[in-house]
Image: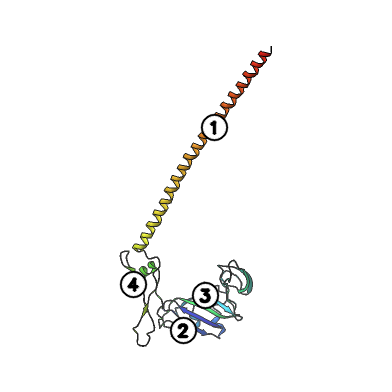
């Protein structure tokens, strides 16, 4: 079995092959995210503690956290699940994955050093790989350099040197700072809030005008209704008087 051991503090990782079954027996029946002492790998690993972060079996199927078995299962995976990358929106697919328990059928076991021991491991803890890119978000740049709110974040961006072209000056490249609060950003925010207030005021005025117009229309409709009633009663009374007069003339 191969052990892929990484050390986050230095940014290095190392792949070692272990054929001795007795050394690997310590990792058997352990689960992912469990912490194990690495002293079984040799005297130079004395004091080291590693965390099991995953692995692959001999056919290349990855271990998946939460599957409490040491065998292979087929799961219906969708967006957000590990061991699966959807190609279309809403796509689901049944895929084979391995359980989170370590056994002898694994080809590669991934380990992360969480506690360093007494001795240095060549190629792993004795060298440091510099980070290629620095932080991009304004708050993370402040955290890295321990800056205050008044400090200008733009002066502390980590610039990356580019390969120099023949006959040209050496160039550097810097990321665009995200979530940086500048006077222009504040001005746009004030403008958005002013537009919002303006829309709310306009809506209130239009609602008040509509209510006023509605009340006027209702008043006019009421007056027309009363007028119709008056005219109807007046015409009815005139017809009644005409009938009574004609009947009196006949007598």
**Color encoding of the figure:** rainbow
Mark 2 burial class by Cα count in 10 Å: few <14, some 14-19, many 20+: few
| Residue 51 relative to residue 241: left or right | left
Q: Earlier in the sequence, mark 3 or mark 2?
A: 2
Residue 58 spot, x, y in % from top left: 60, 81
User: For mark 4, what is the residue?
Assistant: 156
Q: Earlier in the sequence, mark 2 or mark 4?
A: 2
Mark 1 burial class by Cα count in 10 Å: few <14, some 14-19, many 20+: few
Vertical order, 126 against 149 (above or below): below
Between residue 73 and residue 204, name the one nearer to us. Answer: 204
User: Given this view, does label 1 or label 4 mark the residue nearer the observer?
Assistant: 1
> Considering the numbered disc 2 on the image, is that residue within a helix, a strand or a loop?
helix
User: For mark 3, what is the residue?
Assistant: 52
The residue depicted at 61 percent of the width and 23 percent of the height is 236
Between residue 162 and residue 211, name the one nearer to us. Answer: 211
User: Given this view, does label 3 or label 2 mark the residue nearer the observer?
Assistant: 3
User: For mark 2, what is the residue?
Assistant: 43
Q: Earlier in the sequence, mark 3 or mark 4?
A: 3
């Amino acid at each position: 079995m191969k052990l892929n051991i990484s050390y986050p503090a230095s940014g290095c990782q190392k792949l070692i092959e272990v054929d001795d079954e007795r050394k690997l027996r310590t990792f058997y029946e352990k689960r992912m995210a469990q912490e194990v002492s690495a002293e079984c790998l040799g005297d130079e690993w004395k004091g080291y503690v590693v965390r099991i972060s995953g692995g692959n079996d001999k056919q290349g199927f990855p271990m998946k956290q939460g599957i409490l078995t040491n065998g292979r299962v087929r799961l219906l995976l969708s967006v957000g699940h590990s061991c699966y990358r959807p190609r279309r929106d809403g796509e689901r697919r049944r895929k084979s994955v391995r359980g989170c328990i370590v056994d002898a059928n694994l080809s590669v076991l991934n380990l992360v050093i969480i506690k360093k021991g007494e001795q240095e491991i060549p190629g792993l803890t004795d060298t440091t790989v510099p980070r290629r890119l620095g932080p991009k978000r304004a708050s993370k740049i402040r955290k890295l350099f321990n800056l205050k709110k008044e400090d200008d974040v733009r002066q502390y961006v980590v610039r990356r040197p580019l390969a120099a072209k023949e006959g040209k000056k050496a160039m550097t490249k810097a990321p665009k700072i995200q979530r940086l609060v500048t006077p222009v950003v504040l001005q746009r925010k004030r403008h958005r809030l002013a537009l919002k207030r303006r829309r709310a005021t306009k809506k209130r005025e239009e609602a008040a005008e509509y209510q006023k117009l509605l009340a006027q229309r209702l008043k006019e409709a009421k007056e027309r209704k009363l007028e119709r009633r008056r005219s109807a009663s007046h015409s009815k009374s005139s017809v009644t008087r005409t009938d009574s007069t004609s009947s009196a003339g006949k007598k």
